Amino acid sequence: MALTLYGDLDLSVIDEMPPGRTPVQTRWNAEEQLPGVWEFLRREIGQGRQAYIIYPVIEESKQELKAATAEYERLSRDVFPNLRIGLLHGRLPSEEKEDVMERFRRRDFQMLVATTVIEVGVDVPNATVMVIEHADRFGLAQLHQLRGRIGRGTEKSSCILLAPKNIMGDARERIETMVATTNGFEIAERDLKQRGPGEFFGTRQHGDLAFHVAHPLRDHKLLELARTEAFALSDNPARAEELRKITAQLGPEWFNRYRLAAVG
């Protein structure tokens, strides 16, 4: 998103949902509300729908996060013993991953326990519910991509974010953003504000802006004008001397970065 403001990418805008899609309703529940969440899943599956349950890690670790493999066993044994549940994560062989996903599409599985491996490229219109455990541990872009796996049909869909109600700071803002909007542009803007775009002429992909005055979101109209003027200047051989004088005003730090960019 930030790179589009600096002439590095062209921008195409898709500002509407595909025909027939129904907006996803998102709610924030705490761990103690899990029994009600599981009951909601049972009702949806009882009506012929399918569901995803997402976990942040594959196996249990010292982080005290619920893991997909362990929760798959527990859910299959203790919570949904009468349902057909599949397991999908990144350590499975490619053939097995494809088989699990295909069986979920065919409705052999009513529920799929997974990690973020389903974040993109998964289209199952009959899946109408997604539960994301430890939702406060995921980034905004991840949460938005995951939620995009449901609501792909005409039926009403629900995304349930499980996280403590007392979280604060960026984590709370991420959850509140997901509950408040499904607009990808708004979510991208808030994600950019939270994480920063990183270095435009370097390798860091997130972090604070290196500007003392300008801000790519607040000043985007001025930056778009500057971009237009910059291309007009650089594309006109008659203004070469003017361009040289302008670039001579750059400080050593920016001049070195531009020289690095020119290598590409």
Image: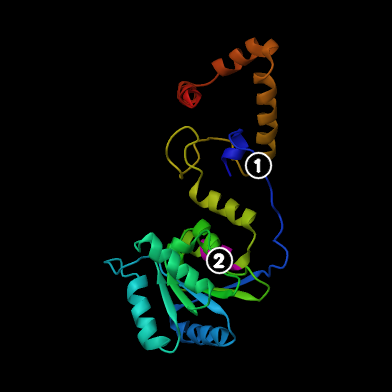
Q: In the image shown, does 7 or 94 lie closer to the viewer?
A: 94
Amino acid under label 1?
Answer: Leu
Which numbered dot is residue 11?
Answer: 1
Which residue extends farthest left?
62
Asked if residue 211 lies left or right of residue 85, the reply is: right
Point out the stretch of residues depicted in magenta.
Answer: 173-179
Give the crowd class for mark 1: few <14, some 14-19, many >=20 residues within 10 Å. few
* Residue 1 counted in the magenta span: no
- In the displayed structure, 140 sits above or below 109; it is above
Position in image of residue 28 (x %, y %): 53, 73
Q: Who's the residue at 43% across and 79% down the image?
A: 85
The kind of secondary structure element at disc 1 is loop
Name which of mark 1 and mark 2 comes first in the sequence: 1
Q: Residue at x 70, y 61 (%)?
A: 18
| Whether label 1 touches label 2, CB < 8 Å | no
Find the distance from the CA under tag 1 to the CA under tag 2. 24 Å
Residue at 68%, 35% in the rendered image: 224
* Image quarter in which the N terminus is found: top right
In the image, what residue occupies the spot 55% across and 66% down? 147
Q: Which mark is residue 147?
A: 2
State which quadrant residue 117 falls in: bottom left
